[in-house]
Image (cartoon, rainbow, N blue to C red):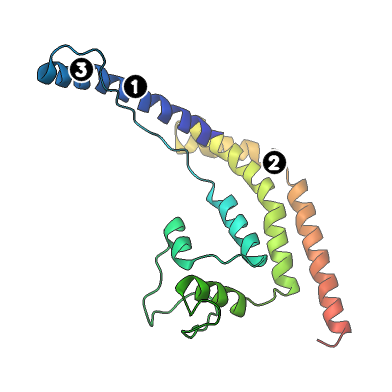
Amino acid sequence: MHNDVRLDILFDDAQSLAATINQSLIRLMVDLNYGEVAAYPVYRLRVEEPEDQRALVEIVEKGVAMGQPVSTAWFSKKFGIPLPEEGEAVLGNRAAIPDGSEGDGGSTPHRAAHATHAHAHAPDAAEIATATLAREAQPHIDQWLAQITLMLDEADSLEHFRAMLGAAWPKLSSEGLAEAVTTALAAMDLAGRYDVARGA
């Protein structure tokens, strides 16, 4: 909600700035250089809405899981994550992919896709439960953060915010989060029992 309000303010500021430039600068420059004209050029300040990167990451994850090749160069540029230098330590357990992969003669996008599929490990029960818990708990946490953000905006001092937070804390609903945690723990317990039962 706050981001939408900030974006509306940004759009209004951009329109006001463009109107000032058109009226005070563009018309003056055209009049001085060309005299009277039938129409003046119009300056517009473009404001692009921020992209929902979380949703985009989910789309990329699903696409890769379905076999869609994704260029590492595009991913790096899109999310502002620099590609590692040769020999530089990287996060995760990724082995180097030899040149000359089959299919397209070892082109970079093909090797990137090959690396993604060849080295992706099947998640175990704990990883699946953790990811599920994070997904299920996030909406409840977002509600808390939204309320806390409102308090921050309304508070005129740290002491005021502390008092508001102390008064609101008992009222912050935790039922949904507790249910998500309980479900995740039950799922992990069942997964552990299954692993033991099959001799893992």
Q: Residue at x 73, y 51 (%)?
A: 177
Q: Which is nearer the eye, 74 or 56?
A: 74
Q: Name the kind of residue labelled 2 in the image.
A: Pro
Residue highlighted by disc 1: 16
Q: Residue at x 72, y 60 (%)?
A: 132
Q: Where is residue 122 in the image (x, y as percent from the top left)?
A: 69, 76
Q: In this view, does 115 lie to the left or right of 9?
A: right
The residue sitting at the bottom extreme is 199
Q: Which of marks 1 and 2 is in front?
A: 1
Q: Which residue is drawn at 37% across and 80% down?
A: 86
Residue highlighted by disc 2: 170
**With respect to residue 6, does 90 lie above or below?**
below
Residue highlighted by disc 3: 27
Q: Where is residue 59 in the image (x, y as percent from the top left)?
A: 61, 55
Q: Nearer the viewer, mark 1 or mark 3?
A: 3
Of callouts 2 and 3, which one flags the residue occurring earlier in the amino acid sequence? 3
Q: Name the kind of residue labelled 1 in the image.
A: Ser
Q: In this view, does 183 lie to the left or right of 71?
A: right
Marks 2 & 3, CB-CB < 8 Å contact: no
> Helix or strand or loop: what does disc 3 sit on?
helix
